[in-house]
Image (spheres, rainbow, N blue to C red):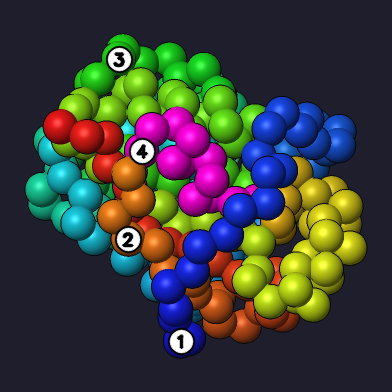
Amino acid sequence: MHTQRLLTANGLNGPRPHPGTTGFYRTRVLPRLLDWSERLPGFEAARQRAVEYVGGHVLEIGSGIGSTLMFYSGEITSLTTVDPNPVLNARARRRLRQVPFPVDVREGRAESLPVKDASYDCVVSTFALCCVDNLDAVAAEIFRVLKPGGRFHFVEIGLSPDPAEARWQRRLNGLQRLLVDGCRLDLSIETALTGAGLGIKRLEMTRLEGLPKPLGCAYEGMASRAA
Ligand SMILES: C[S@@+](CC[C@H](N)C(=O)[O-])C[C@H]1O[C@@H](n2cnc3c(N)ncnc32)[C@H](O)[C@@H]1O
């Protein structure tokens, strides 16, 4: 897998309500799409890497059907998950018997997390930030809920450093947003995180195996709140 250090900035992270995806989409299509993504080696390996060094009291945002649950290590004290989709949350709850730590599955949006300030050692997000309505607001919430010294671990779709590829991402954005729960292809994760006061400790660009280049440009890494 090709991986390289990358810095991007595109100023597109502000409020952007996504096109109306129907109830049918969210209750029937999206769960199947997430099932399918668990069979793609590129997605599974990326989720596994994202949670590898996570421990203590952990919050996962945009947790979907609980695709990362199996990958958390024994270092977890507790896990809280937050996702607005009750159908996906119900699917995640069915998997909880398989994990050895307490998990609290909550319904909510990452723009206004239903949790206390400075209460988590780690926050995790895998392929969720592209779907939120306001990435800057979500980054500010991640900062708020992390304890001083806490870490945000992520793998997210983002803007390609290759201008030709970036043009394709912008052309494909409308279609992608309809097909994948409003997921944008051209966000700058780094701009949003640094704007919220988080310090980027690691940021690498990864190509997700099996996807066309404009769809498979992902950023994985870790950012922290100063101690
Ligand atoms: C592409 S799925 C990724 C799910 C999961 N993290 C994974 O790795 O498969 C995007 C997820 O973000 C959730 N989502 C959409 N808008 C959100 C928001 N404003 N706050 C939190 N999660 C949101 C969706 O319900 C969905 O579960």
What's the magenta region? 187-198
Q: CA distance from mark 4 to mark 3?
A: 15 Å
The numbered mark, 2 or 1, whose residue comes first in the sequence reads 1
Q: CA distance from mark 3 to mark 2?
A: 24 Å
**Could you say whether the residue bearing mark 2 is in a helix, strand or loop?**
strand
Q: Amino acid at mark 1?
A: Met
**Could you say whether the residue bearing mark 1 is in a helix, strand or loop?**
loop
- Is residue 140 or residue 46 the one in the foreground? 140
Number of numbered markers: 4
Q: Which tag is nearer the camera, tag 1 or tag 4?
A: 4
Whether tag 1 and tag 4 are in contact, CB under 8 A, the answer is no
* Residue receiving disc 2: 202
For ligand 1, give the image quadrant. top right
Q: Is residue 133 magenta?
A: no
**Could you say whether the residue bearing mark 4 is in a helix, strand or loop?**
loop
How packed mark 1 is, by other alpha carbons closer than 10 Å (few <14, some 14-19, many 20 or more), is few
